Image (spheres, rainbow, N blue to C red):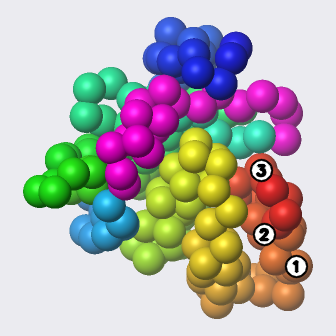
Amino acid sequence: MSADARVTRSTFRRIQSIAAPRPLPEPPPRIWSDEEWGRIQLGYAARGMDEKWNVFAEGEVVFLHRSWTGHGVFEATFTPVDGGGRRITRAVVEGDTDRYRGRDDAFDCVMLELVISAIVLGEPATDLRSKLVELTQRKSPSADAAAGVIQHSALGLRSDS
């Protein structure tokens, strides 16, 4: 599949809706440009076993699913803002801990933005990666895990990706 081909729900053989939707009280505050929104709408299909996310858009809603299980983890509604661009005005996250083990709202907010920024848009997202590591180390029993291990576990990307 070319980088410009649109990824849709039918691209994936296993897609499961979020089983226990939980509102994310404060979605990421970022405003994505119209160009970035165009790229987000194209979606992203995991290209190998190490990649952990599939992303597709339907209308104004972007769906983020784990690539191996097909479980829905996030749904984010993008709304146009005055002056151009879009922001997430509503987001839900999987509340079933057997399907997704978010740590708290702050972690989920960072994870949502990071998947869109680093995976879909291919940005370095250095600050978001650092925040993900910090939040993970603060709450996890494996607090001594290396930053690269934490990022790979959550994103499927190396720290230099």
In the image, is residue 18 above or below residue 146?
above
In the image, is residue 23 above or below residue 37?
below
- The residue sitting at 26% across, 51% down in the picture is 86
- The residue sitting at 67% across, 73% down in the picture is 126
Q: Amino acid at mark 3?
A: Gly
Q: CA distance from mark 2 to mark 3?
A: 9 Å
Q: Which residue is mark 2?
A: 150
In the displayed structure image, the side of residue 130 where residue 149 appears, left or right: right
Q: Amino acid at mark 1?
A: Ala
- Residue 128 is situated, as x and y percent measured from the top left of the image, at 58, 73
Q: Quadrant of residue 101?
A: bottom right
Q: What span is colored magenta in the figure?
A: 32-50
Question: Could you say whether the residue bearing mark 2 is in a helix, strand or loop?
Answer: helix
Disc 2: CA contacts within 10 A as few (<14), some (14-19) or many (>=20): many
Closer-to-camera residue (41/24): 41
Contact (Cβ within 8 Å) of mark 2 with mark 1: yes
Q: Is residue 88 visible?
A: no
Closer-to-camera residue (100/159): 159
Closer-to-camera residue (141/133): 133
Q: Which residue is mark 1?
A: 146
Q: Quadrant of residue 132?
A: bottom right
- Residue 92 is situated, as x and y percent measured from the top left of the image, at 32, 51
Q: Which residue is mark 3?
A: 156
Q: Amino acid at mark 2?
A: Ile
